[in-house]
Amino acid sequence: MNSYASDGVIPFHTPGHKMGKGIHPLFQEAVTAKALKLDLADMAELDDLHEPHGPIKEAQDLAADLYGADYSYFMVNGTTGGIYSMILTLAGPGDKLIIPRNSHRSIIGGIILSGAIPVFMQPEVDNDLGLAMGVTPETVAESLKQHPDAKGVLLINPTYYGVATDLKKIVDIAHSQDIPVIVDEAHGPHLKFSPRLPMQALDAGADIVAQSTHKIIGAMTQCSLVHCRKDRIRVPRLKAMLQLVQSTSPNYILMASLDVARMQMATAGRTLIERAVDLANQARREINKIPGLYCFGNEKAGNPGVFRIDPTKVTVTVKGLGITGAEAEQILRHQYKIQVELADIYNILFLITIGDSEQEVQALVAALKDLAATHQGSHDVSALPEICQAGRYPALPKQIISPRDALFGNTCRVPFADAAGKICAEIVTFYPPGIPILCPGERITQEIINYCHVLQNAGLHISGPEDYLLKTIKVVD
Ligand SMILES: Cc1ncc(COP(=O)(O)O)c(C=O)c1O
């Protein structure tokens, strides 16, 4: 890219801004003229993401070597695109796919696109934290027993909050029935680089894995990797699905950032990730000394659904202060200029990465000390609605028709409060953390309606339904 950009070529090709010359100065100033010269399109010298045989192929092969895959592929529309292509590779209309209920909405999106039937596995729930943890090997084994015709098992490694299940055991169980395992490793592209982190999915034997290189290590937003082992996967089908979900005009700056992030991990990954783990452990120790706050760590390992913990996800439980995670998020942002990764009813999540230093950790600890001192006992925690205190999630709704049939069938809109008994035609997710509460094709229950009201009243934002206030909901007519 650099040599093309500095070769003095007269570009009669896309993009239309012609290496920045035609772009509005406002944008040029923001991203620099130098960067815009690198915003190029596919051409012989620069290779083609969809038929790579030159520099892109070389870069993808280097990523496969680094992570221990047979093949790796660049994604420029995030792990979302990676998850779509993994699901489409394994499952078509009517095929069963076993997935955890605490799946990110991109997984539900993949189910809708493929026409597959989800077989949901209930994750374990930690009532103290009010958090969904991993699914246990026993749950997976039971699902496989009930559905031996499933085309695959999808797992999350680790969860957004850094909880890893016993993936190796689960992969062995699925493989003993010759069923492939695909893994949403959006939050785990760094696992390979420290023995103090949970095992990465490829090392546990998973067949296809999607990682958000942009979330945790050094690539730009939207940049992810899909890794594959060829034994149980039809690689040409995976390639076809990657083509289906990706733009024919992938952004070269994004792809270059993926390659450089790979290079950074190959050359300095161990040092950088070990430092992030040290910083996170230091933060955790100091936060746990603050009255009213709790930051879970290795003591949770061995609990149901928890095999190991990724310490770089620093989840701080604030319910001891009598405030919600959403309230803590607002206070930290506006009084201390600290932005959390996500907030839920009880918790706030901070990510410690290769971009952090002692200084940021100290600022975080100081802000949390102050927050705790000023809010300690400000409310009675028992004032929070009962359903939250118990950390009780509503029972899984019944799947009546496939998500795809519900989405594309005849629908109408009804008041959400009166929707009990109807079949939902859209996704209802509180985001973050992006775990669907209702999926298309499921029967809405009164318990779910009540639970959604609780989350709304706690200030969490709804994502998914057309009516984002959830006064009404789309249902199958
Ligand atoms: C668990 C999980 N999977 C998948 C995704 C989608 O990843 P991306 O944002 O890279 O498309 C996310 C995003 O937050 C996520 O949290």
Image: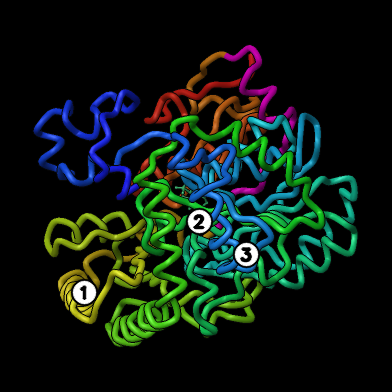
Say the numbered circle drawn on residue 360: 1
**Which of the two discs, 2 and 1, sits closer to the camera?**
2
Colour scheme shown: rainbow
User: Which of pointers 3 and 2 lies earlier in the amino acid sequence?
Assistant: 2
Say the numbered circle drawn on residue 59: 2
For the residue carrying disc 1, how many other residues have a C-alpha within 10 Å: few (<14), some (14-19), or many (20+)?
some
Q: Position of residue 137 (x, y in %)?
A: 76, 68
Q: Does the numbered disc 1 mark a residue whose Cβ is under 8 Å from ligand 1?
A: no
- Choose between 424 and 119: the one closer to the eye: 119
Q: Position of residue 370 (x, y in %)?
A: 16, 75
In the figure, residue 192 lies in which quadrant?
A: bottom right
How far apart, in angstroms, are the residues tagged by discs 3 and 1? 30 Å
For numbered disc 2, what is the local secondary structure? Answer: helix
Residue at left 34%, top 37%? Answer: 40
Residue at mark 3: 134
User: Which of pointers 3 and 1 lies earlier in the amino acid sequence?
Assistant: 3
- Choose between 3 and 452: the one closer to the eye: 3
In the figure, residue 262 lies in which quadrant?
A: bottom left
Q: Is residue 16 left or right of residue 404?
A: left
Residue at left 57%, top 43%? Answer: 52
